[in-house]
Amino acid sequence: MSKHHHRGHAEGPSQRQLRVAEEIRHALSAVFTRAEFRDPDLHGVHVTVTEVRASPDLKHMTAFVSALGKDLTAVQMAALKRASPYLRREVAQAVRLKYAPDLHFQPDTALGYAMHIDEVMRRPEVQRDLAPKKDGEE
């Protein structure tokens, strides 16, 4: 199967992919908000779904997750993978699709990176470097 057939849209996700992905993100977020996971590795972890990307056939959803702005640990990511059949059922009930999509989880490192940059920007020495120079200052 070649990647060269464009069905009338530019490269990038279609409106349908974007809409379904956002519905999935919303449904997953709701599950994470109300579900108490029996898995001890997920106990008390507040999972935030920052983004979901849908495959063109909508059979695969990649959810980008963090724990309140911190990266999830490898152990927590493994626990999410174990929980994915349950999460898939929950999402399938909430979002009506022909196929219940496979859920894949990725740590949202961009969020952690953004928070790190924010923290760096607040450092006094960086603030000094960013401050407008007064006349006569080098």
Image (cartoon, rainbow, N blue to C red):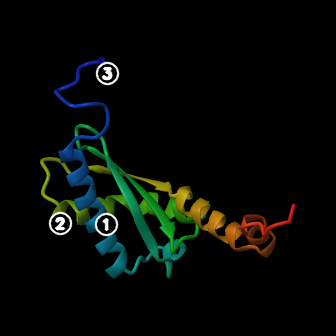
In this view, the residue in front, 109 or 10, is: 10
The image shows residue 59 at horizontal and vertical percentages of 25, 43
Asked if residue 61 is positioned above or below residue 25 in the image, the reply reads above
Q: Secondary structure at mark 2?
A: helix
The residue located at (26%, 67%) in the rendering is 27
Badge 3 element: loop
Task: Kindly identify which numbered label has been placed on residue 28.
Answer: 1
Q: Is residue 60 above or below residue 1?
A: below
Q: Earlier in the sequence, mark 1 or mark 3?
A: 3
Tell which tag, 1 or 3, sits nearer the viewer.
3
**Which residue is the site of mark 2?**
94
Could you tell whether 121 is left or right of 22 in the image?
A: right
User: Which callout, 2 or 3, points to the residue nearer the camera?
Assistant: 3
Q: Is residue 82 above or below residue 1?
A: below
Q: Amino acid at mark 2?
A: Ala
Can you identify the residue that label 3 sits on? 3
List x then y, in percent, for residue 100.
21, 52
| Mark 3 crowdedness (10 Å alpha carbons): few <14, some 14-19, many ≥20 | few
Crowding around mark 2 (Cα neighbors within 10 Å: few <14, some 14 to 19, many 20+) is: some
Question: Residue at point 49% right, 64% down?
Answer: 79
State which tag comes first along the sequence, 2 or 1: 1
Residue at the (56%, 57%) spot, across then down: 109
Front in this rendered view, residue 15 or 42: 15
Relative placement, left or right, of 138 versus 7 is right
**Which image quadrant for residue 116?**
bottom right
Label located before the other in sequence (2 or 3): 3
Q: Secondary structure at mark 1?
A: helix
Q: Position of residue 89 (x, y in %)?
A: 24, 62
Residue at point 12%, 57% (across, down):
96
Q: From this viewpoint, which residue is outermost toward the front?
A: 135
Distance, label 2 to label 1, CA atoms, is 9 Å
**Image coordinates for residue 22, horizontal then vertical, percent:** 26, 58
